Amino acid sequence: MSVTSIRLQPEIESPLEKLATKLDRSKNYLINQAIKEFIARKSRDEARWNETLEALDSVKSNKLIEEKSVNEWLESWGTDNEVNPPKI
């Protein structure tokens, strides 16, 4: 495990200290958790962006699914006759 030092702004340091005390956790633990969550969120954002670009390419290529098929699929969710998602 590596060690990295950071400078915290006073408006971050004080609430962090209070939260660490309240949760009975170290500031190090909370900072690591925050960074993990930030990285996971950015990773999801990137994946969504890539999916958006893929969807736009699909539209440009006229590879579309009819609205009726999508609605039938969605309306079947949770029923005994749930249908498979529509495909291009």
Image (cartoon, rainbow, N blue to C red):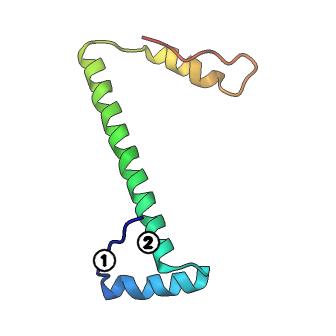
Point 51% across, 14% down: residue: 86
* Residue 30 x %, y %: 49, 72
Q: Which residue is mark 1?
A: 6
Instruction: Count numbered badges in the picture.
Output: 2
Mark 2 vs 1, N-terminal side: 1
User: Decide: marks 2, 1 in contact (CB < 8 A)?
Assistant: yes
Quadrant in which the N terminus is drawn: bottom left
Quick one: 2 or 66, which is closer to the camera?
2
For residue 54, what is the image quadrant?
A: top left
Q: Tell me, for residue 32, which label it has, or none.
A: none
Q: Amino acid at mark 1?
A: Ile
Q: CA distance from mark 2 to mark 1?
A: 10 Å
* Residue 38 x %, y %: 39, 59
Quick one: 66 or 13, which is closer to the camera?
13
* Residue 50 x %, y %: 31, 34
Quadrant in which the C terminus is drawn: top left
Quick one: 41 or 65, which is closer to the camera?
41
Quick one: 75 or 14, which is closer to the camera?
14
In the displayed orientation, state which residue is furthest to the left: 60
> Would you call the spot at circle 2 few (<14 residues within 10 Å), some (14-19), or many (20 or more)?
few
Residue 55 lies left or right of residue 31; in this view the side is: left
Point 60% across, 15% down: residue: 84
Q: Amino acid at mark 2?
A: Ile
* Residue 69 x %, y %: 51, 14
> Would you call the spot at circle 1 few (<14 residues within 10 Å), some (14-19), or many (20 or more)?
few
Point 27% across, 25% down: residue: 56
Q: Which residue is mark 2?
A: 31
Up the image or down, 33 lies above or below 9; here it is above
SS at mark 2 in the image: helix
Up the image or down, 65 lies above or below 50; here it is above
For residue 49, what is the image quadrant?
A: top left
